[in-house]
Image (tube, rainbow, N blue to C red):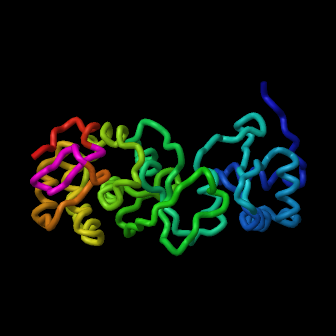
Amino acid sequence: MTVTRSIPTSIAPVLEQLELDGDVIVTVDRLAEVLRETGVKDEPRQLAYELQRAGWLGSLRTRGAWEFLPAARGGAISSGDRFLEFRAQRELDPAWPGVLAMESAAGVLGLAQRLPEREVVSLPSRIEPPKAFAGQWRAVTLVLPGEAQTTVDRLPTWNLDGLVAGIAGRPAAYRDLPGLGQWLPDAAARVDPELLIRLLAGLPSTASQRAAYLLAAGGNAEASVAILRRFPPRSVARIGPRQAGGRFNAATQVSDTALYRYLAVGTGA
C-alpha cells in the first residue's frame, strides 16, 4: 500500500532539492545549505523538526543527523542500510578518519558472502569510536595509508590490497575465517604485488610473511615469492594461537593454527 505523506508548500523546494541531490543523511548544516540554495525562509533545526514530524526524516543514534526518506519509497520507510550511522558520522565531521576495515571492507568489496556480526571500522588509537556505534561496531587500530583505500557507494574502505595487508598485519581482527577461506583465491588472483609490498613496508616484518602465506594459500605463488624476496622471513610468524597442531609453512615461516582448515590450496611445508 502506498502511503502519502504531506508536503507543506513552504518546504517543498527543500524536499525536491534533497531528492535531486540523492541525500542519504541530512544534518543541520546540510539543511542550512539547502535553505540558502532554495531561498526558503526557515531555521535549520526547526525545519529538521518539521520534516521529521511529517515523516521525511528518520531517527538515527547519531545526534544531529537523520536519514532522508525520499518519496520513491512510498512512505516513511528506512532503507535498512547497515552503514547509516557510519554515513551520519562522516556527514557531521568530514575530517573524521574512520575507514571500513576487515569483514566490513570484504563485504563492500563484494568478497564476503555473509554479513559480519558487527561492522568494523579502522581508527587511530587516539580516537574513540562514536557513541552511536556502541554494540553495533568494533574498531581496529591498524591504520593504513591512503593508497590502501578506495570509495564504494560513498563509503571509504580498505581496497583489496589494503584488506590483504590489514589481515596480514592483524589476523586475529578478521573474525570470519571460513569466509576468508572462501574468497581468498579470488582476492589473491587480483592483488597488485607492487602496491601490496609498499603497504607491507609500513607494517611489522611478520605481516609480510603472513601476506605471502595468504597469497600462496589463495593460489598466487608468483606474488607470494615476490613478497618473500623483498621481505625474507626472520622468525616464525603466527596465524592463530600458539598451540599444538595446525600447519607450518617452511617458505614463509608461518605457523597457522586457525585458518588452515578453511583453505582450499595446500600450504604445508
Q: Closest to the observer: 29 or 188? A: 188
| Residue range highlighted in magenta | 244-259
Q: Is residue 14 left or right of residue 160?
A: right
The furthest residue to the top: 1
- Residue 223 figure quarter: bottom left
- Residue 202 figure quarter: bottom left
Magenta-drawn stretch contains 252: yes
* Residue 87 percent coordinates (x, y): 60, 56
* Residue 219 percent coordinates (x, y): 17, 42
Q: Residue at x 64, y 40 (%)?
A: 80
Which quadrant of the rendered structure holds the N terminus?
A: top right
Main SS category, magenta section: loop
Q: Residue at x 41, y 55 (%)?
A: 173
Q: Is residue 11 left or right of residue 246?
A: right
- Residue 13 figure quarter: bottom right
Q: Is residue 84 left or right of residue 257?
A: right
* Residue 245 percent coordinates (x, y): 22, 43
Where is 155 relative to 177, above or below? below
* Residue 44 percent coordinates (x, y): 82, 65
Q: How many marks?
A: 0
Q: Residue at x 18, y 38 (%)?
A: 265
Q: Closest to the observer: 6 or 171? A: 171
Magenta-drawn stretch contains 79: no
Q: Closest to the observer: 191 or 144? A: 144
Q: Residue at x 42, y 36 (%)?
A: 113
The furthest residue to the front: 244
